[in-house]
Image (cartoon, rainbow, N blue to C red):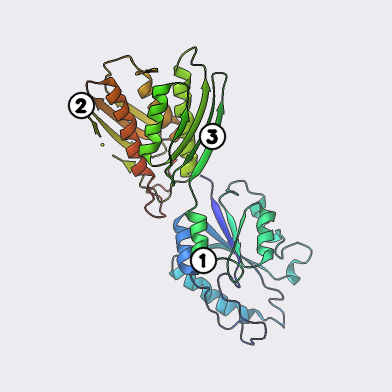
Amino acid sequence: MKRKFLFVDRDGCLVVEPPDEQLDRYEKFDLVPGVIAALQRCVAAGYELVMVTNQDGLGTDAFPEDEFRGPHDLLLRIMVSQGIRFREVLIDRSFEHEGLDTRKPGTGLLRHYLADDGWSRAESAVVGDRESDMRLAANLGVRGLRVGREGMAWADLARALLDRPRTAEVQRATRETRIAVRVDLDHAGEPEVATGIGFFDHMLEQLGKHGGFALSLRCEGDTGVDEHHTVEDCGLAIGEALRRALGDKRGIARYGFALPMDEAAADARLDLSGRACFVFDGRFPRERVGGLPTEMVPHFFRSLCDALGANLHLAVRGENAHHMVEACFKVVARTLRQAFRREGDTLPTTKGLLA
């Protein structure tokens, strides 16, 4: 995954901005309520912090460096003591950068970020309390999040940034199939599935229903030739949509682990490791259930794992093929539900990446 940044304003955003008439405005400061807890959440979620601040006239007789530097350094030490570090502190002093467009909303201080394609514009944001901060966000091509009197509280900002719905849409078109799929991992809903294979529709409905996520899928496939392409490509499209919706996987449970259905029993062991692997153990007593060839059941899950980046070991036993196939879809759905569950903000790996 690409790196992601929060470009954070200072005055009015990190520290309460005192009235202009207050003579000792640079000698002491108060933190904006909720800023520490919110930034701790953002750091835990993998954001790198960059402070970007306008300090007009800093270093002149009207605004001596010492009046600013002591309180500013104290602010940084407080942040570090709480696990919050800024990778850069960028200060526009106006008179030093004349003609370089460094005063916000200008991007002069951030030219090295504009020239770098190694970070995600979609995941990054500018956080500030003024319209100039929001215009800076537009100039950088990232989201603008406003805090303070005319914006939201820091706690609400962290929720908007980190707890946003995990949704994705995928369009897949080949000479054999045309598929549109949408998933929402945080809102269960009645599945809407149409593939042209009735029993396969029923199984995909089980996947969404018991997986606890909203699933909408429409497929136009060459079922007049064979069911293979439709089943395979639906697995690939659903897997891709789930992978996109998970994002960098921070906060997820990651693992899922078991399901009887009458005389049948299925066991699934899942790891959303980012590495595709599928192992199947089972034999179906019939070649078809409805319009679905039973040989396509493990093939569907292999395709799902390939696109999702999942390690799945699936085993099934029983006497009734209908029950056995349905048990497979239900048990995988339940393990996905467990693995998708949010448990915090941290990435569930010691490697620093799940990909």
| Secondary structure found at label 3 | strand
What's under tag 1, amino acid-wise?
Trp
Neighbour tally class for label 2: few under 14, some 14-19, many 20 plus, Cα within 10 Å: few
Which residue corresponds to the image point at 50% horizontal and 52% vertical from the top-left?
A: 164
Q: CA distance from mark 1 to mark 3?
A: 33 Å
Say left or right for 313 vs 291. Answer: left
Q: Quadrant of residue 53?
A: bottom right
Q: Position of residue 70 (x, y in %)?
A: 56, 79
Sooner in the amino-acid sequence: mark 1 or mark 3: 1
What's under tag 2, amino acid-wise?
Glu
Neighbour tally class for label 1: few under 14, some 14-19, many 20 plus, Cα within 10 Å: many
Q: Please determine whether, in this image, residue 100 is positioned above or below residue 29.
A: above
Give me the disc on residue 154.
Answer: 1
Give me the disc on residue 263.
Answer: 2
Give me the disc on residue 117.
Answer: none
Q: Please determine whether, in this image, residue 118 is positioned above or below residue 27.
A: above
Residue at the spot of label 3: 170
